[in-house]
Each structure stands twice: as C-alpha cells, then as structure tokens.
Image (cartoon, rainbow, N blue to C red):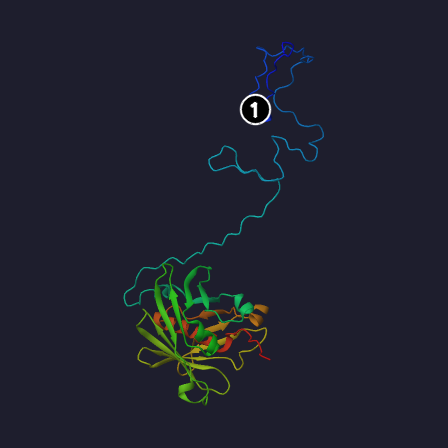
Amino acid sequence: MSGVVPTAPEPSAGDMENQVKAPEPRPDDPPNYNSHFVPGPPGPAGPQPYPGGLPMGHYGPQLPSTFALYSAAGGTYPIQYQPGQYPAPARSAPITWMPGPTPMPGCPPGLEYFTQLDNVHVLQHFDPLELVTRLEANNRYDIKNNLDQMVYMVTEDTDDFTRNAYRTLRPFVLRVTDCMGREIMTIKRPFRCTCCCLCCPSARQELEVQCPPGVPIGFVREHWNLCRAVYSIQNEKRENVMRVRGPCSTYGCGSDSVFEVNSLDGVSNIGSIVRKWNGLVSAMADADHFDIHFPLDLEVKMKAMIFGACFLIDFMYFERSPAQRSSK
C-alpha cells in the first residue's frame, strides 16, 4: 500500500466554466514601431480644385451638390440647391381698389363710387368645377373701372338645392360688398313661374335693388315682347323712370349684345348695357363680361338701378347651366 500515490479528484465540467481566467499581462507602454513615413514639403494653404473637375459621384466642400443640403433652423449653413434657373413661386396678383370717396349728403352709403364713374365693367368668375361636376355654383363678379381698379365685389348667396333645381330660373340674392367687406347693396330676384302663358304678369321676371340692405331704391320689371327683351326701371314707388331695350337676338356669335337704356318716350338715349363677346370663352364657358355706360351726372340711385338690371339680363339670357347627364 505504500507504493500507491494519492491523486486529486478531477474537476467537473461545471467547475471549469465557473473558473475565471486571469487577465493576460499587458505592457506598460505601447511597442515602439519604426515609421517609414517621410514628411514632404508643405503644400499651398486652402483646398485646391480637382484637375479637370471632380469625378462623378464626388462632391467638393466648396461646390453645391446635386441634392439639397438641409440644415436645422438656427444653423449657420443655408439651404443649397443645384445651380440653374428655377420658376418663381406662383403668387396671386394684389387687388388694387379704387380710392374711396368721401361720404356725400343724400347719397346712400357705399354708392359714392358711382358719383365718379360713367361706366363700369362687370367680370364674372369662371368656375372650372362646373364643367367637371356639372353642378351649378354660386356666381361671383368683379366690378372694375377703366383703370382696372376694383370697385365692388358681387357674390351670389343661394342654397345648393335651389341653384341646381331651378338653374337659370332660380331666385337669387346678390350681395355687393366694398373694399372693407361691408355689404352696401343687396339685389334680389324672386321666383316667377314660367309654366303659364308668357304674357301673364305672374310669369314676368322682376328684380329688387336695396341700398342699404333692407331699404328698396328701385325695381326692374320685364315686359312681354314678341321680338326683343324689354324692361322698365322703376323707383322705390314703382314708378317707371327708364326703359331697357335689348337686341332682337341675344345669341349672336362673334358680336356684342347691346341693351340700350332710353327715356320713357324712347327719344333720348341714357346709357347702355353691353355684353362683350370674348371668343370661345363666351361660347363655351359661363364667364360673361359686361360694360355698363351711363352719364356722369345721372342720379346715383338710377346708376345703381342700371347696374342691377345687368344681372337680371345675365341670368335670363347669358347664364349657362352645366350640361346634365342623360339617364339611359
């Protein structure tokens, strides 16, 4: 038994994994490697351009890149773009308004502009959605003088059902506003049934002009005539003061349609309402252009009545409803 040497038990696999290996000794200083770099002569200060230009796919620090470089707000570097000409952003032209005159005694507020004018231009806005959707939209008009200055803005205020159910025969309310957005005039057209005889008084169209809104200053009434359009302009007491006579045909292609404003006896000519022919725009689109002429010294209320008669003429003869889809 004395010849047997005792041995220690072999460690298990779990004990070997739990043992922590001692870290390898590290040198105190890094090894000293011999460098083969030989410094050359000093170069010129600042970046030098690449000979023949930069190769494709490389961008220099002083040249704008193909893509925009964005910097956060408050950064020191602005946004850079590729060199070249870029179209300017679309901006709506500013509206130039006619200088407002001083208030005058005996003149309804807002009608002082008419005291300085002998003619105005009525320009209807063209709405392309009417051609796409075939739905009637509220009409809008710009009223300008000869200097292309805005005098008034006219906006129709009619609900969707009435517009699309009655189309050109619809009753409407037009609100005339000035440069301050104040409604200075209201033009109303009541509904008139056209299913009965045209010579019946209940079928004749009528227009009421209020200035200020709620205070009638006159009416425009249609008269039955077999050949042409005839209207009478009345004061607030429904007394006839002027007549409007239209052409025999308002569907002339390539020519203006002139509605003459005459005295009651038809001898003297007072003014005119001219629907201008604008080529294909007049033939295909609902964007009319009217020129209204009246004497400079005419009473301001009568100028407003001739102005209001223009819209009744527009709705009766030149308003085009979008074509309806045929149901098959």
- As rendered, which of 242 and 30 lies closer to the eye? 30
**Depth check: 23 or 250 in front?**
23
Q: Position of residue 109 (x, y in %)?
A: 31, 65
Taking 202 as reference, is 19 left or right?
A: right
- Residue 125 position, x and y percent, is 49, 65
Amino acid type indicated by mark 1: Asp
- Residue at the spot of label 1: 15
Tag count: 1
Residue 223 percent coordinates (x, y): 43, 85
Relative to 105, residue 162 above or below? below
The residue most toward the right is 52
* Badge 1 density bin: few <14, some 14–19, many ≥20, Cα 10 Å: few
Quarter of the image for the N terminus: give it: top right
- Residue at left offset 30%, top offset 80%: 237
- Is residue 155 positioned above or below 257 on the image? above
- Nearest the eye: 191 or 288: 191
In which quadrant of the rendered view does residue 221 lie? bottom left
Q: Is residue 166 toward the left or the right of residue 80 in the image?
A: left
Q: Quadrant of residue 222?
A: bottom left
In screen coordinates, is 133 left or right of 210? right
Query: Does residue 23 appear left or right of residue 73 in this picture?
Result: right
Res 62 quadrant in image: top right
- Whether residue 279 appears in this view of the structure is no
| Residue drawn where x is 50% and y is 52% of the image | 91
Quadrant for the C terminus, please.
bottom right
Residue 176 in view here = yes
| Relative vertical location of residue 162 with respect to residue 200 in this rendering, above or below | above
The residue positioned farthest toward the left in the image shown: 105
Q: Nearer the viewer, residue 49 or 215?
A: 49
Task: For mark 1, give the secondary structure.
Answer: helix
- Name the spot of residue 47 as percent of width and height, x first: 62, 24
